[in-house]
C-alpha cells in the first residue's frame, strides 16, 4: 500500500510538472457563425472559426502586422509577379501533404461558391495567372503591379484540393472541413456551438487546449451569466453595460483594444426609386432623395456621434470620421469626425428640395455588432428629431446580410473590419463601384459610385511605393467621405473577459483565437 501511495504521489507530481496539454477551453462567442465554409461569407465570426481549422499563406499578429504562415517568405520578382515559398512538411487533418496544388484549388474556388452574401473575390480577382514552380513554390501573375498580394493572401483560407468542388453544406457537416489549422472540426451545431479537437500534427506545435468548444451566445445576459457561473472560461464582445461589474470581480480579467471595425450607414445612392423611403404621407416618392449628396450629408450631420459613444456604447468606442482608425495605414488627418449640426442639416435639405423631409426605414442587425440595434434606434431618434421620421427594422444577421446583398434596403447599418490592416480593403469593398467581375464593391450595398474614388483606389492598388500608395488611399477616402458615400459612425473597442487566470493579448482584428489564450501556470 505504501508503495502504491508513493507511486501515485510520484505520478501526480510528474503530471503537475507537465504542460496543461489536456485542458479544455470553452469560449462564449457573441455573434452567430453562419458557416464553416471558409470561402462562403466574408464575415468576421466565420473567418474567426476558419482560422482555427484552416491555414493561410500569411497571417496577422495582434497588431494586424503580416507574418509567415503556410508561406515562409514572399517577394515580388518583377512588377507583376509575386513568388511565395511554401512551408514544407505541413499536413492536412487527414494526413495528406500540403502543396502548391492546394493553394491553386483554394484560389480558384473562391469565385465559384454559390449564393455568397459577401464573397472573397476582392482578394483573388487581381490574380491573372497562377504558376506552380514546384510543390512548394508558387507564383501569382497580375495584369499590373499589385503591392497588396501578401495582405490579400492573409484573407484566403487554404483548403485541401480534393474538396475544391465541395458544397458549403459539405463543409458545414465536417465532410470537407479538412484544413491545416491547429484544430479539427468535430461538430458544428448551427446556432448552438462548434466542437473542436486539437490537431496534434499542427506545424505550429501542439496547442495548450486539447478540446475547444465555441458556444454561440448572442444574448449578452446569457454570455455574462455563463462566464460568472464558470460554464465558459472566456467570452468575447463583453457587453458595455457589464464592463464595470466584471472589472470589479477578482475572479475575472478584462482585455480591450480599439479595433479596425468601422460601424457605418450605407445609403442607396444609385437607384432612381428606392424601396424603403417614402413621403411623409407614406406614399412612394417619384425620385430617390439619397442620390443627392446634400441629403446624405444632412443625414450625417444629424447624428451625434459622441452621444452614441457615451450613452449607447458607454464609452467603449471611438467616434469615426473615416474608414480606418488613425493608427492604420491609409488614415488621413484631413478627415475629422462630422460635427453634430442639425441646423446645417436642415439647410442642406432645403437646398436639395426636401424642406419637409421624408420618411425612411433603417435596417440593421440585432445580434452581430456591439449594441447594434440600440445604435440604430439612437440614429432613428436623431433623424426623426431632424425632420426625417425613421423606423428601425432590426433582424438576425443570417437574415439581414442576404437581403442587404439583394439590395432590398434603402438605408442600412453595418460594420466592416479591414482584415488587411490598412484602408484599401475598406475602400475596395465598401466604396468602389460595384463590379462583380473585378471583385470591387463586394460589400457596397448602397451602390455608391464615384469614378475619381475608383481611379485613386486603383492607382493605390498598383503602386508599390508605400508613400505614394498611402497618398492615393488618403485622397480616395477624402473624396468618398466628403461625398458621403457612407456615414462613418464609430470604431468598436473589442472586449474580452476571462476567468481562472487565463490571459489573452487583445487584437485589432477582433478575432478570438483559442490557441492564443494562455492558461494559468
Image (cartoon, helix red, strand yellow):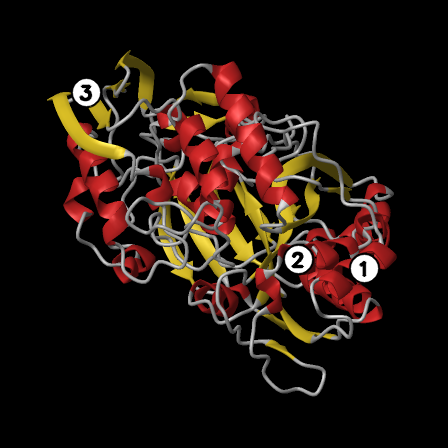
Viewer-side residue, 116 vs 177: 116
Callout 2–callout 3 Cβ contact below 8 Å: no
Viewer-side residue, 124 vs 31: 124
Q: In the picture provided, is 93 more to the left or to the right than 135?
A: right
* Label 1 packing within 10 angstroms: few (<14), some (14-19), many (20+): some
Closer to the eye: label 1 or 2: 1
In this orientation, does residue 94 appear?
yes
Callout 1–callout 3 Cβ contact below 8 Å: no
Cα–Cα gap, marks 1 and 3: 62 Å
**In this rendering, is residue 220 above or below 360?**
above
In this orientation, does residue 392 appear?
no
| Residue, disc 2 | 296
Residue 136 circle label: 3
Q: Residue at 85% of width from left, 49% of height from top?
A: 310
Q: In the picture provided, is 516 more to the left or to the right than 235?
A: left
Closer to the eye: label 1 or 3: 1
Cα–Cα gap, marks 2 and 3: 51 Å
Amino acid at each position: 500500500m505504501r508503495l502504491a501511495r508513493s507511486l501515485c504521489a510520484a505520478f501526480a507530481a510528474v503530471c503537475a510538472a507537465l504542460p496543461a496539454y489536456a485542458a479544455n477551453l470553452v469560449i462564449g462567442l457573441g455573434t452567430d457563425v453562419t458557416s464553416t465554409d471558409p470561402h462562403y461569407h466574408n464575415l468576421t465570426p466565420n473567418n474567426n472559426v476558419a482560422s482555427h481549422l484552416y491555414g493561410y499563406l500569411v497571417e496577422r499578429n495582434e497588431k494586424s502586422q503580416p507574418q509567415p504562415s503556410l508561406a515562409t517568405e514572399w517577394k515580388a520578382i518583377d512588377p507583376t509577379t509575386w513568388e511565395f515559398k511554401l512551408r514544407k512538411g505541413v499536413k492536412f487533418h487527414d494526413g495528406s501533404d500540403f502543396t502548391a496544388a492546394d493553394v491553386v484549388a483554394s484560389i480558384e474556388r473562391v469565385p465559384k461558391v454559390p449564393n455568397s452574401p459577401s464573397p472573397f473575390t476582392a482578394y483573388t480577382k487581381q490574380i491573372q495567372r497562377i504558376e506552380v514552380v514546384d510543390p512548394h513554390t508558387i507564383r501569382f501573375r497580375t495584369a499590373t503591379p499589385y503591392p497588396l498580394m501578401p495582405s490579400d493572401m492573409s484573407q484566403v483560407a487554404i483548403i485541401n484540393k480534393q474538396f475544391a468542388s465541395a458544397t458549403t453544406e459539405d463543409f458545414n457537416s465536417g465532410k470537407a472541413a479538412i484544413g491545416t489549422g491547429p484544430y479539427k472540426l468535430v461538430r458544428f451545431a448551427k446556432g448552438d456551438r462548434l466542437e473542436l479537437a486539437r490537431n496534434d500534427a499542427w506545424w505550429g506545435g501542439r496547442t495548450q487546449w486539447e478540446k475547444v468548444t465555441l458556444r454561440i451566445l448572442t444574448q449578452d445576459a446569457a454570455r455574462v451569466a455563463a462566464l460568472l457561473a464558470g460554464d465558459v472560461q472566456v467570452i468575447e464582445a463583453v457587453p458595455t453595460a457589464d464592463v464595470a461589474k466584471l472589472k470589479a470581480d477578482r475572479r475575472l480579467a478584462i482585455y480591450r483594444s480599439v479595433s479596425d471595425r468601422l460601424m457605418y450607414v450605407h445609403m442607396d445612392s444609385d437607384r432612381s426609386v428606392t424601396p424603403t423611403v417614402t413621403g411623409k404621407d407614406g406614399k412612394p416618392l417619384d425620385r430617390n432623395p439619397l442620390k443627392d449628396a446634400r441629403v446624405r450629408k444632412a443625414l450625417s450631420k444629424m447624428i451625434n456621434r459622441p452621444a452614441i459613444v457615451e450613452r449607447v456604447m458607454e464609452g467603449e468606442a471611438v467616434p469615426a470620421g473615416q474608414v480606418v482608425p488613425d493608427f492604420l495605414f491609409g488614415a488621413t488627418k484631413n478627415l475629422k469626425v462630422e460635427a453634430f449640426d442639425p441646423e446645417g442639416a436642415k439647410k442642406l435639405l432645403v437646398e436639395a428640395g426636401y424642406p419637409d423631409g421624408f420618411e425612411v426605414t433603417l435596417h440593421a442587425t440585432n445580434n452581430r455588432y456591439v449594441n447594434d440595434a440600440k445604435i440604430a434606434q439612437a440614429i432613428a431618434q436623431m433623424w426623426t428629431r431632424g425632420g426625417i421620421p425613421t423606423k428601425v427594422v432590426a433582424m438576425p444577421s443570417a437574415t439581414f446580410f442576404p437581403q442587404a446583398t439583394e439590395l432590398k434596403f434603402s438605408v442600412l447599418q453595418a460594420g466592416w473590419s479591414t482584415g488587411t490592416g490598412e484602408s484599401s480593403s475598406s475602400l475596395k469593398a465598401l466604396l468602389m463601384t460595384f463590379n462583380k467581375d473585378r471583385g470591387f464593391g463586394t460589400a457596397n450595398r448602397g451602390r455608391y459610385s464615384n469614378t475619381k474614388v475608383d481611379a485613386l483606389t486603383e492607382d493605390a492598388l498598383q503602386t508599390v511605393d508605400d508613400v505614394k500608395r498611402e497618398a492615393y488611399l488618403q485622397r480616395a477616402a477624402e473624396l468618398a467621405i466628403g461625398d458621403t458615400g457612407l456615414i462613418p459612425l464609430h470604431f468598436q473597442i473589442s472586449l474580452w473577459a476571462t476567468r481562472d487566470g487565463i490571459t489573452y493579448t487583445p487584437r485589432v482584428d477582433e478575432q478570438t483565437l483559442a490557441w492564443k489564450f494562455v492558461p494559468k501556470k
